[in-house]
Amino acid sequence: MTAKKTSQATVKKAPLARKRQTVGGSIVEGLQQAIAWTKGADDHVRVTLVHVPQVDVRRVRRKMGLSQAQFASKFGFPPATLRNWEQGRSHPDAPTRVLLAAIAKHPEAVEDALGKAG
């Protein structure tokens, strides 16, 4: 008994052309994913968590040898806000803490960037 061979042509399918997403569509998709994530849905949402450092503003300012007024003026902070941070009456928000961390590690880079921006 011989086995009958059947030959089938292998058909290679071309990959489906992916429709290019618009900026608006990307924003809407991101918002929908964020809403799903906050509701607890595991919707294969990419979440990026960034550790925002705590910064001792007084220590950074003193290390630089600047008065409150000098530090505030050099880096564009209102002097009253700087005083409130140093005295614990208020705290810098996350983006400001990132800026303060950059000032603490590389003050010359921040000064350079601010000098060119202004």
Image (cartoon, helix red, strand yellow):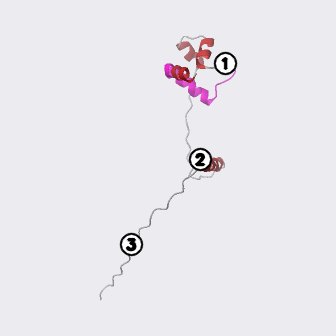
Label 2 sits on residue: 23
Q: CA distance from mark 3 to mark 2?
A: 39 Å
Mark 1: give few (<14), some (14-19) or many (20+) Cα within 10 Å: few
Mark 2: give few (<14), some (14-19) or many (20+) Cα within 10 Å: few
Q: Nearer the viewer, mark 3 or mark 2?
A: 2
- Residue 100 magenta-highlighted: yes
Q: Earlier in the sequence, mark 1 or mark 3?
A: 3
Residue nearest the viewer, comparing 25 with 1: 25
Q: Secondary structure at mark 2?
A: helix
Residue nearest the viewer, comparing 47 with 110: 110
Q: Mark 2: which amino acid?
A: Val
**x then y, percent, for residue 49:** 56, 39
Q: Which residues are magenta?
A: 83-109
* Residue at 51% in and 57% down: 18
Label 1 sits on residue: 78
Q: CA distance from mark 1 to mark 2?
A: 36 Å
* Residue at 63% in and 20% down: 77
Label 3 sits on residue: 10
Q: CA distance from mark 1 to mark 3?
A: 71 Å
* Residue at 46% in and 62% down: 15
* Residue at 61% in and 15% down: 73
**x then y, percent, for residue 100:** 57, 23
Q: Mark 3: which amino acid?
A: Thr
Q: Which mark is residue 29?
A: none
- Residue 101 magenta-highlighted: yes
Look at the picture and state if 16 lies above or below 2.
above
Q: Secondary structure at mark 3?
A: loop
